[in-house]
Image (spheres, rainbow, N blue to C red):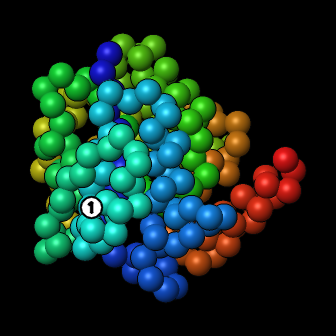
Amino acid sequence: MRIAALVLAAGRSRRFASGNKLLAVLEGRTVLERTVAAVSEAGFSDIAVVTGPAHVATGEILRAYPVRFVRCPDEKDGMGYSIAAGVASLGPDIDGVAILPGDMPLMTTATLRSLVDMFAAQGGKRIVHPVDRAGEQHNPVIWPRAFFADLQILAGDRGAKFLIRDAFGVRIADDSTLLDVDTAEAFAIARQALTGKSAAV
C-alpha cells in the first residue's frame, strides 16, 4: 500500500503574533522543519509540501529533506485551496494521503506510523485520524483514495473536516504531539515541551 503525506505550508499565519509561524524557531529548528522531520522518517511513499507566499524560504529550510513542493497560487489563500492543490499532484498509484498542517512541531514519527499502520489494517478503505484523551478528532487525517475527488474541489478557508465519515480514531498516548501552533500561546507551550524534553535527556 502506497501512502503519501501532504504537509500544508501555504498559510499566512494571521492568528500568530508576529511573522510566519512556520518559520519561527523552536530549539534550533523552525516549526515547519520539525514537522517535516517527523514526516520524513515515517515511511511515506511520497511527501508533498504545499507552499504559498513563503515558497522560497520554505524551499531553503527543507532542502535537506526528501520532499517535493506544490505551489498554491498566492491569490488562492485558504486551507481548502492548499488541500486541493496537493491532492491533485498525487500520482495514480497512491492509495491514501495523510494531510497535516505544517505547524505541528511536536508530531512524532511513532505517532505517524501508528496511524499509517491502522490505515493499512483497515484495508485503506476508512479515514483514520488521532483522537485525544477526550475523544476529540485531531490532525493528521489519512484519507482513502475514494475521497481524492472530493478533496480536489475544496476551496477557500474551509478544510476537509466536513467530509469525515466512517472514520477510525486512534488514541494517541501523548496528546502533546497533536498540538498545532496557531497562536503565540501555543508556540510557548511547544517551546516549554521541547525545553522540558531537552532537560530530561
Q: Quadrant of residue 9?
A: bottom left
Residue 63 relative to residue 28: left or right: left
| Residue 89: percent from left, percent from top | 15, 42
Placement of 125 over or under 66, stated as above or below: above
Please give the residue where the numbered disc 1 appears in the rendered image.
Answer: 51
Instruction: Specify whether residue 198 is in view.
Output: yes
Taking depth in this image into account, of 171 and 30 the one nearest to the observer is 30
The residue depicted at 42 percent of the width and 23 percent of the height is 119
Question: Furthest-right residue in view?
Answer: 200
The residue depicted at 45 percent of the width and 14 percent of the height is 121
Instruction: Specify whether residue 131 is in view.
Output: no
The residue depicted at 23 percent of the width and 26 percent of the height is 94
Q: Secondary structure at mark 1?
A: strand
| Residue 163: percent from left, percent from top | 29, 44
Amino acid at circle 1: Thr
Residue 65 relative to residue 163: left or right: right
Q: Quadrant of residue 123?
A: top left
Q: Quadrant of residue 91?
A: top left
Q: Residues within 10 Å of mark 1 (few under 14, many from 20)?
A: many
Residue 142 relative to residue 74: left or right: right
**Rendered-image quadrant of the N terminus:** top left
Placement of 139 over or under 111, stated as above or below: below
Placement of 43 over or under 165, stated as above or below: above
Placement of 11 over or under 194, stated as above or below: below
Taking depth in this image into account, of 119 and 192 the one nearest to the observer is 192
Taking depth in this image into account, of 152 and 67 the one nearest to the observer is 67
Residue 60 relative to residue 152: left or right: right
The residue depicted at 52 percent of the width and 85 percent of the height is 17
